[in-house]
Image (cartoon, rainbow, N blue to C red):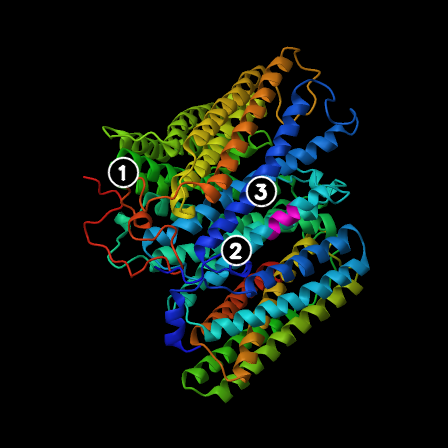
Amino acid sequence: MSNAASAHAHAHHWETSAAPMLIVGGVLFSVVFGFVSWFSYSNILWTQICAGIGVPLLLAGIAIWTAEALTQKPVMEGLTPIALPFFIVSEVFIFMGIFASYWTMRLSAGPNWPPAGTPTDMNLVLPIIMTIILVSSSATYHIAEEKIKHSDLGGFRLWLLISIVLGAIFLGCTIYEYQHLFHMNFKPSTNAYSTAFYSITGFHASHVVVGLGSFLTVLIAAMAGRTNKYLTFCVGLYWHFVDVVWFFVVSQVYYW
Amino acid sequence: MSTASSGFKLSEWIFTTDHKRIGILYLIGSIAAFAVAGIMALLIRIEQSAPGPTIVSDAFTGGDQYNVWLYFHGAAMILGFLIPGLTGFAANYLLPLMIGAKDVAFPRINALSVWLFWAGIVVALLTFIVPDKPDIMWTGYPPYSVNTAGNTALYVFTVHLMGFSSILAAVNFLVTIIYMRAPGMGWNQLNMFVWSCFTALIIQLIFVPVLASAVTLLLFDRYLGTHFFDPANGGDVLLYQNLFWFYSHPAVYVIFLPAMGIFYEIFATMAKNPIFNYKAAVYGGMCFIVLISGEVWVHHLYYSGMPDWLRIGQMVTTLMISVPVGLMTISLFGTLYKGAITFNIPMYYGTAALYLLLIGGLTGIPLAMTVMSVHLGETSFTHAHFHFIMGIFATFAVFAGVDFWFPKISGKMLNVSQGKLGFWFNFIGVNITFWPLFIIGVEGMPRRYWDYSQFPAHFAGYHKVATIGAFIVAIGMVLTISNWIISAIKGEKAPNNPWGSNSLEWTHTATPPGPGNFPKPVTVDADWTPYNYK
């Protein structure tokens, strides 16, 4: 639909989109019903069924949403980069809630920290490597943004792909670290420190997953030759936000 | 006019991204939640009508059954009815119309919000299907919520879905109000309802995530074995209460502010007066509430243990809330002053609201004061207090709002006699229900107890009266809601501006408004206000 046609259509049709409902259905099945089947009723079959229904719905919803966002005219141009910071304010408060909980436990423990059960030889080199990786991925995405500003679609795809790979390596490091710590019998239920450690790093990692997902969405669209300056700006801003949060995670959880 | 697609098409409703239709979807969902939560209220009242087991099966499991009703009544009324009824339905339908925009900034995100809300309703309703029903009130305090056999996950996900819906709606509407006002519309020319939503949504944006984090940690504690709220392993039970009320006290204002906004619109229109003390009510009232809403939550923890200096400080901040609320109330009364008031159904509710505001507000003062709160706080006095100020005041706001904008939304007029009959049942019923609870509250009737055999025998009489009141309210609700449905189908056709309002949603749109809202783009002059009646 051309822009003129869609502007005309706007005044005479009830606008519709199937994407929001698909996404909500996907979340409901894969996250809510999946979690409840697994944890409340220990029913593996039901968990699989819920994931089997939910994940395709979610992916279809995101795909349709992205396609519509890239082709249709917005109600008002250029509001997305303004709205995302509002959402990030909200995200900041989620992290504040969790960090505040950690600080409460940490400060009330006084000198008995870290509590018994914490490995004495926590790997303190890996977090530095992970920091370097994550910061570099922010930098490489910045290069990608510069490329697309100069209409270099090929360069954009390349640097975006590099950012995705770096983000994936970061997640790999988290998984490696978790496995290592589990072998040392340091589990979420071990003590107050493990409680905070897994909750905060896990919550941050879930944001990395969302960031990577949005990178992938942009990459797939860019492969089809479609980009949108607001979208590329927003996924970048979110990624930088996730990067900044990591500094708090590292300084508070690993080195304090 | 823009009514190209005539007739009802299901796909145009369930896939809609139009703010008006999304508003109506919010209304349907919140009324459904209201109906089921109302039935829970009746069950609670029947159980309380006599000491000992009345409808619970026996004394041993009675508490468990009763807890499920308390859980669903509280959670569904607040998360499923009041918040979505005001910042969902009313804000969705009215904000873009009042500021002269053709839709919200992000229509697809708006649709995502409404379906997340509906998903929250679905998860909440699972309570009645699963064997391990959640039984943790709407507060979900640990350690009970961590140790109970009830399904805490359903509670947590209800909060998550509704919360995420609220956050997205807040982002969407804040951007809409800031950037999409009609050319020429300054901040001091906004409708009071727009201001009230603007301030309420700022509160949503900042505080809802904290609740989300609290219940997430609860989920971790319950299912992953972490120790956030487990004092035996370095956690802190009160931590949850702090995080929870850090959101849930401001949530009171998320409900209160738009409710006031609706009454401002009705009062100004029906009295044909400008808002009395507009700037004082907006900046000194609403904006000031945003500023101090986050500094009073600790008064919910008076009985949980805290140092005295903190109690005193919280008493001061809590009492300070009466300053902005007082400013807003004065401006509400002042708007009626020397007006040629039209007394119709919305105005009936509006007048009742003044009374509810007074009783609910004044009974809040002793509860804010620590010395009295120690005696009254955990009694049915508190229960009656917050039902007056929050439950009934805000419910009446939703009803008044629906009645007031009904001609615009449906294109039909309400049946006046049925509406008024419904009002009188509602109004008389709530008084019969909650005044006895004030009285026995002062005498020491505890909140939340299902059985009160160990308390003085005359409590039973008061409880019986309250139960009768609840059934009178139920009749009123059925009359009110059935009136909407019947009138929407076969009511008299409504004129374009039946109340003679000056606000954009009445003066510049078709009835009901079509896609794109305004036939041609709206601009306003420097001397335009929605209350320019002189």
Marks 3/2: CA–CA distance? 17 Å
Q: Is residue A93 left or right of residue B257?
A: right
Please, what is the dominant secondary structure of the magenta stretch?
helix
Position of B391 relative to A77 (above/below): above
| Pointers 1 and 2 within a single chain | yes
User: What's the magenta region?
Assistant: B119-124
Look at the numbered disc 1 and give the secondary structure of its residue.
Answer: loop
In this orientation, which residue lies closer to the viewer: B483 or A28?
B483
Give percent across and percent down for residue A199: 65, 57
Query: What residue is at 72 percent from the left and 63 percent from the top?
Result: A51
Q: Dot 2 surroundings within 10 Å: few (below 14), some, or many (20 or more)?
A: many
Residue A122 magenta-drawn?
no
Task: Looking at the picture, tell me which residue is in the foreground, B129 or B2.
Answer: B2
Counting residues from the start of the chain, the first of labels 1 and 2 encountered is 2
Residue mark closest to the camera, 3 vs 1: 3
| Residue pictured at 30% horizontal, 33% vertical | B331
Left or right: A141 in relation to A172: left
Q: Earlier in the sequence, mark 3 or mark 1?
A: 3
Q: Amino acid at mark 1?
A: Ile
Residue B434, position as x, y percentages in the image:
53, 22
Disc number placed over residue A250 in the picture, else none: none
Q: Secondary structure at mark 3?
A: helix
Residue that mark 3 sits on? B32
| Rendered location of residue B81, percent (x, y) | 54, 41
Residue B59, image quadrant: top right
Q: Chain of mark 3?
A: B
Name the residue type under label 2: Ser
- Say whether residue B121 is magenta: yes
The residue at which mark 2 appears reads as: B113
